Amino acid sequence: MHMVPSATRSYGPAIRAIDQWCNPNSSPGLMRQLLTEDERARLAAIASIVRFKKGAEIYRAGDRTDAVFNIVRGVVKAYKMAPDGSEYISAFLFPDDIFGLSEDGQYVNSTKAVTPVTAYLLPVSQLRTRLVKDADLEFHVIAKLCHELRQAQRHAFLLAQRRGVPKIAMFLQFLEQLQTAKKEPASDIYLPMDRSTISEYVGMSLPAVSRAFRRLTADGIIEFRNRKHVKIVNRLAFEKLAEDPYSLRAPGSVSR
Amino acid sequence: MHMVPSATRSYGPAIRAIDQWCNPNSSPGLMRQLLTEDERARLAAIASIVRFKKGAEIYRAGDRTDAVFNIVRGVVKAYKMAPDGSEYISAFLFPDDIFGLSEDGQYVNSTKAVTPVTAYLLPVSQLRTRLVKDADLEFHVIAKLCHELRQAQRHAFLLAQRRGVPKIAMFLQFLEQLQTAKKEPASDIYLPMDRSTISEYVGMSLPAVSRAFRRLTADGIIEFRNRKHVKIVNRLAFEKLAEDPYSLRAPGSVSR
DNA sequence: CGTGCACTTGACAAAAATCAAATTTTGTGG
DNA sequence: CCACAAAATTTGATTTTTGTCAAGTGCACG
């Protein structure tokens, strides 16, 4: 068995999520590592490391599903191509996320690296074997899937908004919470993707995204340090715009 | 141990999904029962039956999560209430679906019965104990969660559409596929929910939903037998509108 | 057979898509 | 390090679509 140092990131696949079972040793809204050192090592035994350049296609919707991926570094987008060539992004995947969802043995989405990506590749057959032998590991996968399901529902909630400015505010809030949930410094929000990619995620046209950003800036709610770094200047107005029930996370808050 | 007759629906909780592992004994696009008779019996041991009248609230977002539900009969909506009182529906749940997603020990959505509902109630503590002891059962739960995740992504895809008519077409297609996936007669599509509920699911105003239906009718694509029963009259135009990659399900189709 | 609620329809205003042009950034080769 | 080309982003003008508000219509249920 591996003798790994008990550092924060050690060796092997890792998945992180907000615990749905109200784990006592993690504060609300915080993501924690679901896998034990041991589980990570067991997964590492069947995993291999793969790297993708920025913009590289990882797989295409409809391809036979023979692997699931676990991100170590970088950002991935899962998307669908409409017959007219337009893209719709169903999710962004970050480190400690897993992706490679399949239906009838085929990938449901296409995926591309938004930034340079390092990931573990887990062959499904071996993963499956591993899973059915390992109830604890399975349980953690369930927790992660619940997390991804909640994320997908949040995305849908964002998309259901009718006006552009709140959509963008919610998008920024989404990125911010991702950073804070990982205890990363969050004085400003980092946008790893370009405007066009954002527009495909929030379901608006490219000019509409640009205008929404401009509006938020003009109203003194946000401020761009540069194109990929925003700072929330007026927190109150921001939260109000992104009137996302999720944001009511103050201690003693009533409902979500 | 229970001696149950091997009828299609026997006793105990049941979950159904389209298999992601490309199960050889189920044709593509078809939902199958994931649980064995035995697993259903084991779950039945910790489950109790509950009934809700049409319109009844099952739980509210933010309530402590102490139970997960499994629908036997009826339709449930999972929704969020915006501060301004407007509702957003994140999912419809049908027989053999499970619901009761939680985050930090609280329900993420509120839920209401759209029709009269019969369901199994599974206390989370007992379910959790059961799960970690039962790798096979866990595996099936994973499969179901993957299914719900795909559904959520599809919903988001629908919401990302910019025009109303395709949205409604996709919505109808969604209901239709649900029927066919369960091998129910599908000469016409049954809409168990009212227009207002539809509008909250597709993210459009009530008049917009009405207009979209009228447009589809005027263009000879659909036909209402009555307010809750639609028939696809022009299948080709319909599929084209609902240019949802999922619909390319013809044998030999290329990608999804 | 009437009353109420669900749904449809109409008129108008607001927002966003679209098309196109201007501007800024980024990357590359000298 | 600079100049230039290509790409990304912003901005503007116009059109389409949808939301909104309000008034009808019809179905369902008592």
Image (cartoon, coloured by chain):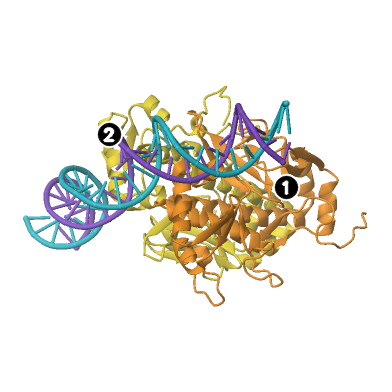
Chain colours: A orange, B yellow, C cyan, D purple
Q: Is residue A7 visible?
A: yes
Measuring from the top left, give residue B231's x and y in whole percent. Answer: 33, 34
Measuring from the top left, give residue A145's x and y in whole percent. Answer: 64, 52
Left-right relation of A111 to B207: right
Q: Residue furthest top?
A: B252
- Give SS at disc 1: strand
Three-letter code for the amino acid on which mark 2 is drawn: Thr
Of badges 1 and 2, the one in the foreground is 1
Local crowd size for mark 2, using a 10 Å CA cut-off: few (<14), some (14–19), many (≥20): some
**For residue B114, above or below residue A25:** above
**For residue A231, above or below residue A132:** below
- Front residue of A55 and B206: A55
Measuring from the top left, give residue A221's x and y in whole percent. Answer: 48, 62
Identified at 52% across, 64% down, the residue is: A246
- Give SS at disc 2: helix
Q: Is residue A19 visible?
A: no
Tell me how far mark 1 sits from mark 2, CA to CA. 47 Å
Measuring from the top left, give residue B189's x and y in whole percent. Answer: 37, 38
Left-right relation of A213 to B215: right
> In which quarter of the view is residue D17 placed?
top left
Local crowd size for mark 1, using a 10 Å CA cut-off: few (<14), some (14–19), many (≥20): many
Q: Which residue is labeled 1 in the image? A: A71
Identified at 81% across, 48% down, the residue is: A43
Number of the label disc, if any, that sits on residue B217: 2
Identified at 42% across, 65% down, the residue is: B57
Identified at 49% across, 65% down, the residue is: A239
Three-letter code for the amino acid on which mark 1 is drawn: Ile
- Front residue of B68 and A214: A214
> In which quarter of the view is residue B79 placed?
bottom left
